Image (spheres, rainbow, N blue to C red):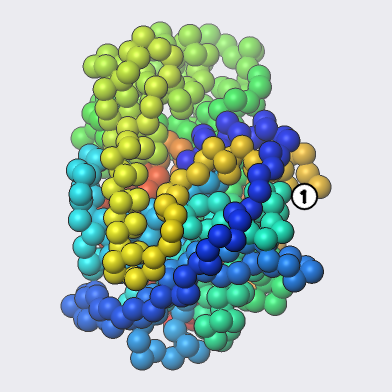
């Protein structure tokens, strides 16, 4: 799910191998159950299927089992009923976050006010589910959830950008074939690193004979140049891309004079400053004159609330990790990275960076894993003899091949998305962004997507949405409903309604 965890493992160039699981006991067969959920005042009867999809190599040898849970509305025509494939990111995250707290038929009733859920937080029917618009398939990447390497599979088979993409292409094709859904409108929904995966997968599927109607990119990580805070001298792109998010977080915590202003208009002002005077000042480097430097420092203070002396010592470059520590350090508080609305006591008030991310509090993860582990066994009747891996960063990340095939550059899948949109002029893309997301900043996403080099006739096929939430936009009730309304319009547009 998180990007920084991924970046920490990029330097591990040698893949550590570990054996596939011995075939001690076969996975249970697909479990089929029947349910109902009320959305918009209408009861929707649906069928849930939980089970494994077998993956094979080119020689027909088994290499892995991918766990998927699907929800299909009863009585709908498969020729016209859309189906959406969901996944989170990491790499090393299962899809429990999207599954249990966004647009599935049920969701963990986590607080909306940026506080962690209490132990035993219940799983409740979700009136904001997308099941009134599309059938849903939630897929866990190999090495996460219940999905695992088997047979002749190895970490090298799956743990890499292109390797992972090929696995998901096969997963989608297998599910589509087994469920007779080749004629259905198809959508992909990826979050965080899952957006990089979505771009790779949509291009691969379309090259392989499966057209896609739409792609939803939630909290995008398409290009790691916009996210890397360990760049060398003169590589200032990330400071520009993070500034509007840092300003939004400062606005939320009432650290700026403009906190009484409308958030969207405040952010627009910071956007213009970031891409204009601020970017120009950074490009001038050591040649920046003292008068302009003082003016930039004053503006950065006005937009972030940080002390002018600190900004001067930082040479105008506000590191996002340090921002999370410094913003509320005077009160001994750490600011959330995945969601800047979250805060918690700083464990090392004298340090340079935040010691932890309050958004990733164990209580939030525990609530999701606990809810899903109970739900899959008791409600979906799928009982397996091993624990569900909500996250598996140490194994997947340590073995991850972060380079694209034939490339030594920083990871990006923006060219894949451009190719997919160019070759399929019916493809629509929706980019959803949280204003308070300090992991994947919305301005960096805008920059990446506005530099795809699309033909002018295709630019309207790319849409954006911005919400008063963080990385997991759906954790905020208002934002989840706003995004749902935007997605309904997006689906109708992508289906040509």
Q: Which residue is drawn at 28% across and 78% down?
A: 35
19 and 355: which is toward the camera: 19
Identify the image quadrant of residue 362: top left
In the picture provided, is 266 more to the left or to the right than 240? left
Residue labelled with disc 1: 405
Q: Which residue is drawn at 61% across and 74% down?
A: 173
Q: Where is residue 465 in the image (x, y as percent from the top left)?
A: 40, 56
**Is residue 395 shown above or below 483?**
above
Identify the image quadrant of residue 33: bottom left
Q: Which residue is drawn at 29% across and 69% down?
A: 379
Q: Residue at x 55, y 75 (%)?
A: 175
**Is residue 193 shown above or below 417?**
above
Which quadrant: the C terminus? bottom left
Q: Position of residue 200 (x, y in %)?
A: 65, 58
160 and 225: which is toward the camera: 160
In the picture provided, is 372 more to the left or to the right than 454? left
Residue 456 shows in the view: no
* Mark 1 surroundings within 10 Å by alpha-carbon count, few (fewer than 14), some (14 through 19), many (20 or more): few
**Is residue 216 shown above or below 16?**
below
Q: Where is residue 491 in the image (x, y as percent from the top left)?
A: 43, 73
Residue 252 shows in the view: yes
In the picture provided, is 479 more to the left or to the right than 30? left
295 and 32: which is toward the camera: 32
**Is residue 240 shown above or below 471?**
above
Identify the image quadrant of residue 261: top left
Q: Secondary structure beneath disc 1?
A: loop
Q: Position of residue 488 (x, y in %)?
A: 37, 71
In the picture provided, is 387 more to the left or to the right than 126? right
């Amino acid at each position: 799910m998180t990007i920084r965890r991924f970046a920490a493992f990029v330097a591990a160039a040698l893949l550590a191998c570990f054996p596939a699981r011995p075939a001690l006991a076969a996975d249970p067969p697909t479990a089929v159950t029947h349910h109902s959920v009320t959305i918009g005042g209408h009861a929707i009867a649906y069928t849930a299927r939980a089970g494994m999809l077998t993956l094979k190599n080119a020689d027909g040898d088994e290499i892995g089992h991918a766990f998927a849970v699907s929800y299909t509305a009863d009585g709908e025509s498969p020729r016209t009923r859309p189906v959406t494939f969901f996944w989170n990111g990491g790499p090393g995250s299962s899809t429990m976050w999207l599954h249990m707290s966004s647009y599935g038929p049920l969701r963990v009733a986590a607080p909306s006010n940026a506080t962690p859920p209490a132990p035993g937080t219940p799983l409740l029917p979700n009136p904001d589910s997308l099941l009134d618009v599309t059938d849903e398939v939630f897929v866990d990447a190999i090495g996460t959830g219940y999905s695992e390497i088997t047979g002749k599979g190895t970490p090298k088979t799956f743990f890499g950008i292109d390797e992972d993409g090929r696995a998901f292409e096969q997963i989608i094709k297998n599910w589509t074939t087994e469920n007779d859904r080749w004629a259905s409108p198809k959508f992909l929904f990826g979050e965080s690193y899952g957006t990089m995966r979505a771009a790779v997968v949509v291009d691969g599927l379309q090259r392989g004979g499966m057209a896609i109607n739409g792609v939803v990119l939630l909290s995008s990580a398409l290009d790691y140049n916009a996210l890397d805070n360990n760049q060398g001298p003169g590589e200032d792109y990330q400071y520009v891309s993070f500034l509007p998010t840092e300003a939004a977080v400062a606005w939320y915590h009432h650290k700026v004079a403009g906190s009484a202003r409308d958030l969207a208009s405040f952010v627009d002002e910071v956007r213009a400053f970031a891409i204009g005077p601020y970017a120009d000042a950074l490009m001038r480097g050591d040649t920046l004159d003292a008068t302009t430097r003082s003016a930039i420092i004053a503006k950065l203070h006005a937009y972030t609330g940080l002390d002018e002396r600190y900004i001067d010592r930082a040479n105008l470059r506000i590191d996002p990790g340090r921002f999370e520590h410094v913003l509320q350090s005077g009160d001994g508080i750490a600011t959330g990275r995945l969601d800047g609305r979250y805060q918690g006591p700083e464990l090392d008030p004298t340090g340079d960076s935040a010691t932890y991310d309050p958004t990733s509090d164990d209580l939030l993860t525990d609530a999701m894993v606990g809810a899903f582990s109970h739900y899959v066994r008791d409600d979906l009747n799928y009982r397996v003899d091993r624990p569900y891996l909500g996250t598996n960063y140490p194994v997947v990340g340590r073995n991850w091949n972060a380079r694209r095939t034939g490339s030594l550059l920083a990871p990006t899948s923006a060219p894949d998305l451009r190719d997919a949109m160019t070759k399929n002029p019916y493809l629509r893309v929706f980019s959803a962004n949280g204003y308070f997301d300090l992991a994947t900043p919305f301005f960096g996403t805008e920059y990446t997507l506005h530099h795809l080099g699309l033909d002018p006739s295709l630019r309207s096929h790319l849409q954006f949405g911005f919400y008063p939430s963080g990385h997991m936009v759906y954790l905020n009730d208002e934002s989840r409903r706003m995004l749902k309304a935007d997605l309904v319009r997006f689906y109708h547009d992508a289906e040509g309604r």
